[in-house]
Amino acid sequence: MLTSLPQTVPALLKWSWQEIEPHFNDLAARTLDAQNVNDWLADWSALDERISEMYARLSLAKTQDTADQNAEQAFNAFLDHIFPQAEAARQKLREKLLASGLEPRGFELPLKKMRASAALFRQENLPLLTQEQKLGSRYEKIIGAQTIEWDGKEVTIAQLRPVYQNPDRATRARAWRAALARQLADRQALNDLWREFLTLRRTIAANADQPDYRAYKWHQLHRFDYTPDDCRTFHRAIEEAVVPVARRIYERRQKRLGIETLRPWDLDVDPLGRAPLKPFRTGAELKTIAASIFNRVDATLGEYFATMVRENLLDVENRKNKAPGAYCTNFPMSQRPFIFENAVGLHNDLQTILHESGHAFHNFERYALPYAPQRQVGMEFAEVASMAMELLASPYLPQARGGVYSDADAARARIEHLESEILFWPYMAVVDAFQHWVYENPDAAMDASNCDAEWARQWNRFMIGVDWRGLEQEMMTGWHRKLHIFAVPFYYVEYGLAQLGAVQVWGNALRDQARAVADYRRALALGGTVSLPQLYATAGAKFAFDAATLRDAVSLMERVRSELEAKE
């Protein structure tokens, strides 16, 4: 058994490669056979959990304050002095296990992933992968520093979100234009950063003997169950089954607002002139509301969330220099998740904590699996955990059922959520189709003006119903404002696939909520031990790309939306 591993977080964060390396050497030197393979895997898992938690905690710190130079330096020191060495050492252990021919119980799929990772590994790519992560930090820093002056105060772009719900159209337009002007001011900096990303990624793919970067990512992401052609099938299905419905949603909004055309600053305001839903004022209130809802969904899930609140495992309020977006990270040594978001008091922030808590619950359920490789799950199902939780929690939004709203406001919130999910599919298709174009045409994509043109082409294909006349520059640079395109390439189709799975889980819940939640939890507990189709099936859904399945999901959403409208 490995000894002298850090047992506390402070000790972990002081760990150096000189202290880590002997543990890898110990594992690499052992004779491996059927009698000791489980102990060997347990020791490797314990070591890997600590390195993964170091990365997660250091990465979290630099996103919590993008202006904190000490946090940035600590993260970069990890990338320079531990990350590449640990990756090389992991490769030796992968090769050792694969060469042994041993297949421990529950390891069929983890071994398949290891084979793919081992085949892709190249020593010369390690410093390039480190550099890629540093470029991602630069993107976060640029976005995190974007502020404007509004009503005499310096505010972040995220803090303008409540203004977009202001009933006064002129105020909304002024705020939206000010935000976009500030974002466009970084256009050249982001274009320059983009070229660095693309150059680096092309080199990484070539080093790994892959025909292009998309092929490299497909292997790296362990996408065994679908192909780029399946993604294109999904895009066409969205164009056929969702875009017409999305257009009707926009038309209904336009008519209710009583305006000639729908503009970008008209998308968040309540179409009936009601004040914005503001379910909380502080982060503490947000946690209290979420806790009450989760206790109604499932007692065990409620206790998971209570643990996170007790142990201060949530950072939810927006502030200057906080990186954009929201995520749930994982501290595997501590067996705890952590939620990061940028809440400003709106209903969308409540939806976000429901979403990210789904990821947190997935982590809690996976901790029961004995070995780290068994807990690695593709985002195509990890996002089912989060998106399904939004829907499974939705019946408990009313005060009478543990939530925060009147029945009318709860109906309004659920309608907004269902409409936003329908509208999301076309946007997802824009992001995914754009990324396929980029890596199919890397020479053209080096010129940001070509990227602008391609984004506009995909936007005009899928995003029908909003008038962007006179705002062409703002529209075509939309790819600048999608973190995934820069920092997490090809991570976006997962959201669309998972949403289709989540709606199916929710459809089951409309018939039998308790059974649907139980099936959901059973699927989460499988971790990464079975394929995506098997995970979906366990959760009560079908892993699908076709228009018929998508049309069924949208029809269900529209039907429930109509039923809720009578309660508004």
Image (tube, helix red, strand yellow):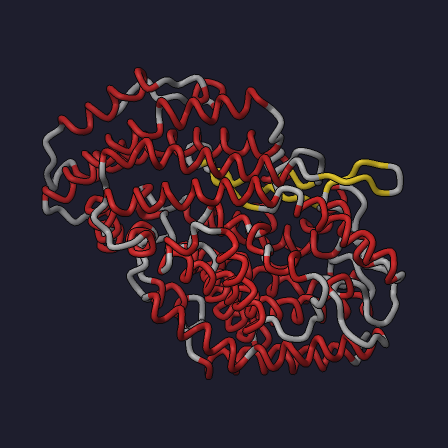
Residue 287: tell me if it is visible: no
Marker count (numbered): 0
Question: Which residue does the image show at 71% across and 75% down from the upper left?
Answer: 250
Q: Determine whether, in the image, residue 169 is placed left or right of residue 373.
A: right
In what quadrant of the picture does the N terminus appear?
top left
Q: Quadrant of the C terminus?
A: bottom right
Q: Position of residue 363 (x, y in %)?
A: 46, 47
Residue lying at 36% horizontally and 47% vertically, measured from the top left? 375
Q: Give x and y (percent) for residue 129.
A: 35, 37
Residue 513 pos. (x, y %): 58, 70
Location of residue 307 (image quadrant): top right
| 72 on left or right of 129 | right
For this view, does 43 lie left or right of residue 36? right
Residue 277 lies in quadrant? bottom right
Q: Is residue 337 above or below residue 522?
A: above
Front position in the image: 221 or 441 = 441
- Percent from the top left, x then y, of residue 168? 89, 61
